[in-house]
Image (cartoon, rainbow, N blue to C red):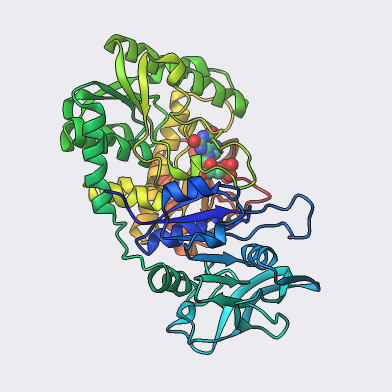
Amino acid sequence: MKNELILILDFGGQYNQLIARRVRECNVYSEVVPYNISLEKIKEKNPKGIIFTGGPASVFGEDSPKCAEGIFDLGIPVLGICYGMQLMTYTLGGKVARANKREYGTTTVKIDNTSSLFQGFDTTNGFLMSHTDFVETVPEGFKNIGHTDSCPNAAMENDEKKLYGIQFHPEVNHSVNGTQVIKNFLFNICKCTGDWIISSFVEDSIQKLKEKIGDKKALCALSGGVDSSVAAVLLSKAIGKNLTCIFVDHGLLRKNEGDEVEEIFRNQFDINLIRVNAKDRFLAKLAGISDPETKRKIIGEEFIRVFEEEAKKLGTVDFLVQGTIYPDVIESGLGKSSVIKSHHNVGGLPDYVDFKEIVEPLRDLFKDEVRKTGLELGIPENLVYRQPFPGPGLAIRVIGDITDDKLTILKKADYIFREEIANAGLHKSINQYFAVLTNLKSVGVMGDERTYDYTVALRAVETTDFMTGVWSKIPYEILEKVSSRIVNEVEHVNRIVYDLTSKPPATIEWE
Ligand code: XMP
């Protein structure tokens, strides 16, 4: 089945992916494509509508990004946002001017609510404005449908040609009811029906994977993280026992985690699972190493080696499954090559494994859609909503060199912290939380005895993108409980500290 499609032309703005997600949240499939996509390509894709994103450029700039000529004559509805509106104006003969002051922030926009774009709105609404250039005169055939105190044309339309421009950003939360503008564009103007739903994606993918793979063999590296887990279950629904998953347990997972992964995949989903218990190998390689980047490198390399050895035992496989997701493959509108995560994950394996083709069943999905797919497939909620966990695992949470004893201490302390966060119902609002075993020993007193033991640090952050974040204001009573439980229940810990730094300047992990 081919879904209705909205094309998002990426002019380099920071909210591009967000626009695509908002459209999908309205159950309409969207794709982000470079701004200079050709008319032929657009026709081939046959979208129901096109959205131009904002961007940092000015239409006056020499190299400013321009869309293909003739795009406005295709008869496909277009919504230009911010720079997109200015470009539409400039291209169609209106006038763009430069204000002497930038307009920024949630701003009251007076709107013409008889326009199909603003159906359901009052005559004023708060939207996020962020611009210096503005549309001074709308192109011929357009009429003004919105203004602010300082921006005469905050919205415009040519209803006959289905061309719309808005100076504000409907996709961000700072805009009140912004999604309604997007919905109006999708449903009133583009006449979408909203056929993008996860259950049909799942059904459809299973069917396609069946056709593609048939009775050939596929191999998947399972990390226990969300993406590889969802990819594996999807594949197993399609090809059953012709899928083999290799789960390299490097011994640096959280308490019980290795067993939980095994339980879910082997017992609940009856997947062919090879679990390699490689803790000793990893610890031997890591012995005496305290530099974080060296630890990462060793773990990344060893991971590949173990995987390769196991894969070789299976002989040639036809397909290698990867849990690549959409944000990893979106090409930037400004023509840069696609973004590939540099962090060590279970990517980067193909050179070492004998396979014929890669299959990436989640390539078109955003993270929240991957999670919905996981739930649809029956993967337990606690795995689907698992907080991010770094590929090198606890190795970068034991500061300095790693020993089995230190790992044991950290696992116990971390488990208590997580348990109390869940008991307090904070596990959904704090995006990442964990314990760190610092390399610091200090003096304490236990009964009448002097102790000289480790300090455990607790780290908890609230963030949406993990690029920036603030430390979480966990109530004192909960911190108190965690602290007292850890010092009482975990041997060799006599002091707990809480990390009060945001990112930046600190990072989320300590190493
Ligand atoms: P930082 O510490 O850079 O972390 O603020 C940002 C996010 O990335 C995760 N992280 C990693 N993930 N391999 C990974 O797969 C790594 O080496 C790694 N280092 C950090 C971190 O847990 C956080 O979610």
Q: Taking the image as drawn, is residue 494 in sight?
A: no
Hey, which quadrant is residue 138 in on the image?
bottom right
List x then y, in percent, for residue 400.
59, 29
Q: Who is closer to the viewer here, 115 or 235?
A: 115
Q: Who is closer to the viewer here, 207 or 61?
A: 61
Image label count: 0
Q: Who is closer to the viewer here, 215 or 312?
A: 215
Residue at 36% over, 51% down: 369
Q: Taking the image as drawn, is residue 208 in sight?
A: yes
List x then y, in percent, for residue 35.
59, 50
Quick check: 405 above or below 470?
Answer: above
Residue at 47% over, 63% down: 75
List x then y, in percent, for residue 56.
70, 57
List x then y, in percent, for residue 403.
48, 23
Q: Which part of the image, by quadrant, shows the C terminus?
A: top right
91 sits left or right of 484 in the view: right
Hey, which quadrant is residue 424 in on the image?
bottom left
Residue at 37% over, 40% down: 227
Please identify the residue farthest to the right as the structure is shown: 100
Residue at 62% over, 63% down: 84
Please identify the residue farthest to the bottom as the structure is shown: 123
Quick check: 37 above or below 134?
Answer: above
Q: Who is closer to the viewer here, 464 or 93?
A: 93
